[in-house]
Amino acid sequence: MDSGRSPTPRRVLAVDDDPVSLAVTVVLLEAEGCFVLQAASGAQALDLAASDPPDCILADLRMPGLASTELARSLRKTAPRALLLAMSATPPQQLEGYDGILRKPLSPESLRAALARRPVAVNGAAVEDPNSAAILDPGIFERLRRAIDPDGLEEVFSVFFNDTRERIAVMRDADPATVRREAHTIKGGASMVGALQISRAAAAIESGIDDPDDRSRKLDEMEAHCRFATIILRQRLNP
């Protein structure tokens, strides 16, 4: 089960240095019922995301200063729970850090699909999130898919995600020894199903994070990876 938030983000931060593009993006988002925050630069986006974390961040890829992958990495730390989408007139084939890419000019249909966390059409074809392979290992997934029927495979992942979320909840208030033990268990399960980012986050926690705020942020990150891996799993099971 998800964190309880509506499947469609309602608080969206739109980031674009072009005022016309930003205005159009805002109008389209508001037409989808979103409350929109606006930023004209990557630096301004970071400030807004830190003071008023949004459900979703929609950022132009090519802006002066902080932008593209560097901006994505900074936003991940500032707003780890947010759905992070890129916008570009010429979307790259591969892009690290973002959960999806939208072609400019935006269309209501593609924007609606992205906000609903469905595959977005780029160059006429539906594509997976750009860093899906980094979240859910495609090789391990294929091996599991060949060995287990679709319903059984979905159940395996459901058990894993539910167990992981329960252990994350325990770790938020546990003593260091319990935190390391729970993280070790998550790491093992994540490795078995190919949940790469969850495994890495668990390994970082298992190695020892003394600062409570840092540990909390890493747990938030792990929860976000669970959410994104669930989305990617649905896409792969229902292409």
Image (spheres, helix red, strand yellow):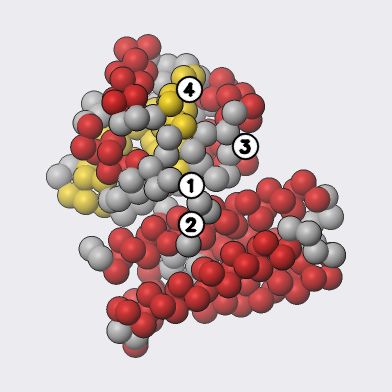
Report the disc number at residue 37: 4
| Circle nearer the viewer, 4 or 1 | 1
- What is the three-letter code of the residue carrying label 3? Thr
- What is the three-letter code of the residue carrying label 4? Leu
In the picture, measured across the screen, residue 206 lies left or right of residue 136, that is: right
Give residue 43's quadrant in the image.
top right
Counting residues from the start of the chain, the first of labels 2 and 4 encountered is: 2
**Distance Cα–Cα, label 3 vs label 2:** 20 Å
- What is the three-letter code of the residue carrying label 1? Arg
**Distance Cα–Cα, label 3 vs label 4:** 15 Å
Counting residues from the start of the chain, the first of labels 3 and 2 encountered is: 2
The reply to whether residue 189 is visible in this rendering is: yes
In the picture, measured across the screen, residue 206 lies left or right of residue 102, that is: right
Return the residue at label 3: 78
Secondary structure of the residue carrying tag 3 is helix
Q: Position of residue 99 (x, y in %)?
A: 41, 46
Return the residue at label 2: 2
Report the disc number at residue 5: 1
Callout 3–callout 2 Cβ contact below 8 Å:
no
Q: Residue at x 15, y 45 (%)?
A: 124
Q: Residue at x 25, y 29 (%)?
A: 106
